[in-house]
């Protein structure tokens, strides 16, 4: 994995009950390495595998914008949807 990377994770939707971690639509987390402060570890567990392609400048091949991807928290009681965005060394769109 090369260089420093920056990412932004934004809560886009909370479909069912309130999120037990308190995440609300519009909450934003910027981070490089590791789980950003204030983000539920369960949500980060879902996000992390999609961070790896950005680290390798590979992007997300099934997305129109290779620097963004939607991620859903695995907690089926709240169904929180996030948008993960690569903020550095963007890959070809």
Image (cartoon, rainbow, N blue to C red):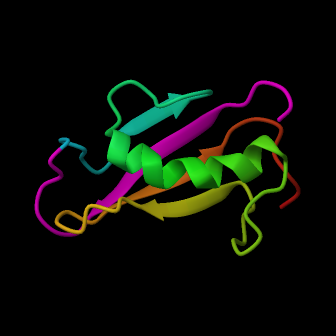
Left or right of 22? Residue 26 is right
Q: Position of residue 92 (x, y in %)?
A: 88, 57
> Of all residues shown, which one is farthest toward the left?
17
How many numbered callouts? Answer: 0
Q: Check residue 16 for magenta coloring.
A: yes
Q: Which residues are magenta?
A: 1-20
Quadrant of residue 82 in the image?
bottom left
Q: Quadrant of the N terminus?
A: top right
Left or right of 17? Residue 90 is right
Q: Position of residue 44 (x, y in %)?
A: 44, 44
* Residue found at x 36% / y 40%: 41
Q: Check residue 32 for magenta coloring.
A: no
> Please, is residue 2 above or below residue 14 in the view?
above
* Residue found at x 76% / y 35%: 88
* Residue found at x 38% / y 24%: 37
Left or right of 71? Residue 42 is left
Q: Quadrant of the C terminus?
A: bottom right
> Please, is residue 40 above or below residue 36 in the view?
below
* Residue found at x 41% / y 38%: 28
Left or right of 48? Residue 53 is right
Quadrant of residue 73 in the image?
bottom left
Q: Position of residue 79 (x, y in %)?
A: 27, 66
Q: Position of residue 54 (x, y in %)?
A: 74, 47
- Magenta span: helix, strand or loop, mainly? loop
Quadrant of residue 75 in the image?
bottom left
> Of all residues shown, which one is farthest toward the bottom?
62
* Along the viewing direction, whichever of 88 and 43 lies nearer the viewer: 43
> Please, is residue 4 above or below residue 9 in the view?
above
């Amino acid at each position: 994995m090369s260089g420093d990377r920056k990412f932004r994770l934004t809560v886009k939707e909370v479909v069912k009950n309130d999120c037990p971690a308190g995440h609300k639509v519009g909450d934003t987390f910027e981070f490089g390495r590791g789980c950003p402060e204030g983000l539920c570890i369960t949500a980060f567990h879902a996000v992390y595998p999609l961070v790896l392609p950005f680290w390798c400048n590979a992007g997300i091949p099934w997305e129109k914008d290779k620097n963004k991807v939607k991620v859903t928290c695995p907690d089926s009681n709240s169904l929180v949807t996030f948008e993960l965005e690569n903020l550095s060394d963007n890959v070809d769109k």
